[in-house]
Image (tube, coloured by chain):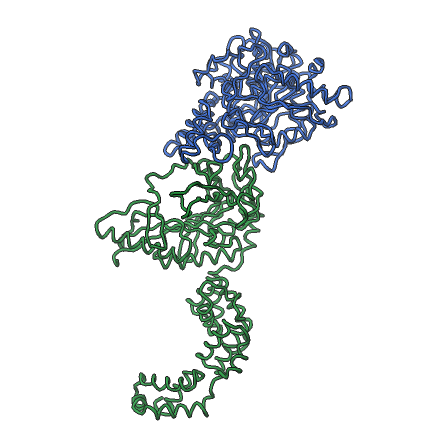
Chain colours: A green, B blue
Amino acid sequence: MAEYEPVIGLEIHVQLQTRTKMFCGCELSFGDPPNTHTCPVCLGLPGALPVINEQAVRYATMIGLAFECEIARRSLFHRKNYFYPDSPKGYQISQYDEPICRGGRLDDVRIHRAHLEEDAAKLEHVSESGRIHGAERSVVDFNRCGTPLVEIVTEPDVRSPEHAREWLTLLRATLKALGVSDVDMSQGSLRVDANVSVRRVGTPELGVKTELKNMNSFRFLERGIKAEVERQVKLLKSDGAVELETLHFDPATGNLTPLRSKEEAHDYRYFPEPDLMPLEVSDDLFASARDALPELPAARADRFESELGLPAARARELAFRGELGDYFERVVAASSDGPTPSELANWIPQLVERIGSDADPASSRVSPESIATLAAMVHAREVSRDAAREVLTRLVSEGGDARAIIETEDLGALGDDGALGEIVDRALASDPSAAESVRVGNERALGPLVGYVMRETKGRADGGEVRRLILERLGAE
Amino acid sequence: MSELIEFTAAEAAARVRARDIDAGELFEAYRERAAGDELNAFTWVAPESPTVTADGPLGGVPFAAKDLFCTEGIPSQAGSRILEGYRPPYTATVVRKLSDAGAPLLGKTNQDEFAMGSSTENSGFGPALNPWDRARVPGGSSGGSAAAVAAGLAPWAIGTDTGGSIRQPAALCGIVGMKPTYGACSRYGMIAFASSLDQAGPLTRDVTDAALLLSKMVGRDVLDSTSLEFPGEIALPRADDLKGIRLGVPEELTGAEGGVEPGVRKSFEQTLALAEQLGAKVEPCRLPHAPHALSAYYLIAPAEASANLARFDGVRYGLRVGGEAGLTEMYNRTRAQGFGAEVKRRIMLGTYALSSGYYDAYYGTAQKVRTKISDDFRAAFERFDFVVTPTSPWVAFELGAKTDDPLAMYLNDFCTVPMPLAGIPAISIPSGLSDGLPVGFQLAGPAFSEQRLLEAAFALEQSIGFDGSPARG
């Protein structure tokens, strides 16, 4: 595998959370009874005409600005013609060769373009599997039809499945911070297709690509791309050829099944939408979009790093998931002198590990004040790191106050002399050969001795302090 | 009863407002005539007289609307079997505006299917007949509206013009028809043929009626992004001369190329002479790209139509054939059975013109020609107030005479197609008879010159003194 590298481009559809649809006044809805949010325009009734939703244009402009795109002050809508029951007009109104956003970048991936369009209706296939094959009949729900979408297309700058996942995490955080979408993959408000090809390392040419459709979580996406990269490499190594096709990844089986080959791709017969005037982004609209931009995750990561002194990886980890960044900042605000922001930040992954990786810490039982207290107590050596972790586990399941738990459970750290010193002495006495090894400089022998003390103190002792005491007593510092 | 029919719509409106005649009686008089329609001009007639407000500016004088205007709960079929019996849940803006101004809806009128045609023979519901000679076509596509107004079955009517569909039937039926500036009237609720060309307008007995009806049709509509605020109010015309008016006669549209009939040419020249007598200056002018207008039109209009008509797929409304046979088969059978031959021809033309690999050569080139035509008019209007032509090269022809030759049929629009491509307004007024059949005279002006056009047309109309009463029987 070493001599091949993946080249991955992503196409992301983002449903905008405007109040109304892209081209009519129907309210957006999710989960309402079918066909209750429709009108002549979004049903494609004869004679109905589209009117552009200004808020959608503002949101698209915000997205473009966030990605450092060039915002076209004048862009065009086209008709993309195809027959399918999810497309009531027989064409989708979309942008084609003159999109609203061009160029740009987010972190290490360049953005090719971003454009506005309308979502299709939702088909429901009445069958056991819910899939079209073997369905008795299909019904159409037009509630979703006409929902504003921004389609973001990247350059093929993504270099691995993991990279795809990490970058999409940043993208999602950025969109969320913008407040333009609820970016929920499970509900389809964020949809990602991946164009995947591989090439020999060092060659500039791109290989033949396949398109992976509709993977509904970042995990599946990562797995899907991984499986496809492996399939392509294997194919090329056995002198086979990759075919241009669209693939459906089944996360249950890990199988990639072709949906359609691009040879039989539609001719969409794009032409400028005559029912709409060219889309003008006025100075006022541009300014209102620019002024509405919040601090974005990439900038936040920079700030965490430069102003709070967090290591780069931790800064990104927290900033790229907005809710973690928010929670972290509340912990920092609740913390007084003592722990550094870096020390505070170390607690966030601990918390995430305990509440589940997709959960928002703000909706857990653990208050930022508790984390600040816990960190302050560790910093002041009032509680050992291990004991504090146990306290965190308790906080996650029961909530409450960190200091109170430590006091009632008697989890406070043992002092550095007195009691702890005695236990250290017992440890040295219990294992003279280990003690001897340490004395002559074999630090690996420290393990059993520290372990003894920890067992005796039920983890209340601070590991570092125990080491220090042992070495001090053995004169091996 | 019958003397009510002899009033023009504007006269009738004035008399209704003066309580000289009763709006209900007026409606009923026309309703009876429309119900007894022998011209197949109507596709639907109001079953009873509505409660009529006599006080609106349109004085309760009823109007007929081309079938393709959506009217809530009332069949709106655009002349197509694929929409047979279709009753929309909403009303077109223009129809609503007229109702709001006090004009009740009398009926819906026959038309070429989806406004594609110049004779109304392409209607899915049989051809409409010309009241001057029932063996002849009334023109099209707004042929039902033109025939109804000419025959006195409706006081006035609205139609749509894409390449001449108001002006040409008005000419062939001896009435006035006006295509306003693109964007002057809302297209919301007009079942689309070619979105960048379609425009609603009045078909009336005289120029005054056209001004009155149009005055209540225009205006920006938030539901139509291509509609525009109309500058000023349209007033009833009063001009009695053409002093200082410069009329340009484009060689390209009036020469041999257009195939103008001798009788039509004669009437046209007589009208030019009259115009000079009224003080106009008449000179030749050039529209170098106008001869290519028809070619550009027959690429752009079908291209847009191929997309506009995609929604007629049997899924949500209208005809569905073969629902049990699977999706593709259902599409094929529904559209094969629902659309007529001319509509299919244009969908195919348009689909081809937009196809990958052909787009630039066809649609792209046509758009360039369109720009050139606009430029030609702009240049002409620097020297002339109006460009004038015969509306149609021919008088009304016999039913079936051109149905086997689509290209001959398309030539009908030779003089009317350039204006919608340029988005400019034009009016057709009757200029006389040729072998007992009406001839139309067309004046076209720059964008939003409607008032000036109406004034000039009015002055000419007074001087011509055309008598349309024979058609009212």
**Numbered label tally:** 0
Q: Can you say which quadrant of the picture contains the N terminus of chain B? A: top right
Left or right, A380 with respect to B73, comes to left
Work out whether residue A422 can be spotted. yes
From the top left corner, tell me how far across and down residue B294 is, in percent: 47, 22
Work out whether residue B242 can be spotted. no
From the top left corner, tell me how far across and down residue A197 is, in percent: 31, 50
Left or right, B178 with respect to A302, comes to right
From the top left corner, tell me how far across and down residue B411 is, in percent: 47, 17
Q: Can you say which quadrant of the picture contains the C terminus of chain B? A: top right
B224 over A353 or under it: above or below: above
Q: Residue at x 57, y 51 (%)?
A: A288
Residue extending farthest to the top is B435
Residue extending farthest to the left is A239
Q: Residue at x 48, y 80 (%)?
A: A379
B377 over A155 or under it: above or below: above
Q: Nearer the viewer, residue B34 or A294?
A: B34
Residue extending farthest to the right is B19
B147 over A350 or under it: above or below: above
Q: Nearer the viewer, residue B372 or B83?
A: B83
From the top left corner, tell me how far across and down residue A160 is, in percent: 34, 57
B97 over B472 or under it: above or below: below
Q: Nearer the viewer, residue A477 or B243?
A: A477
Q: Which quadrant would residue A254 be assigned to in this image?
A: bottom left
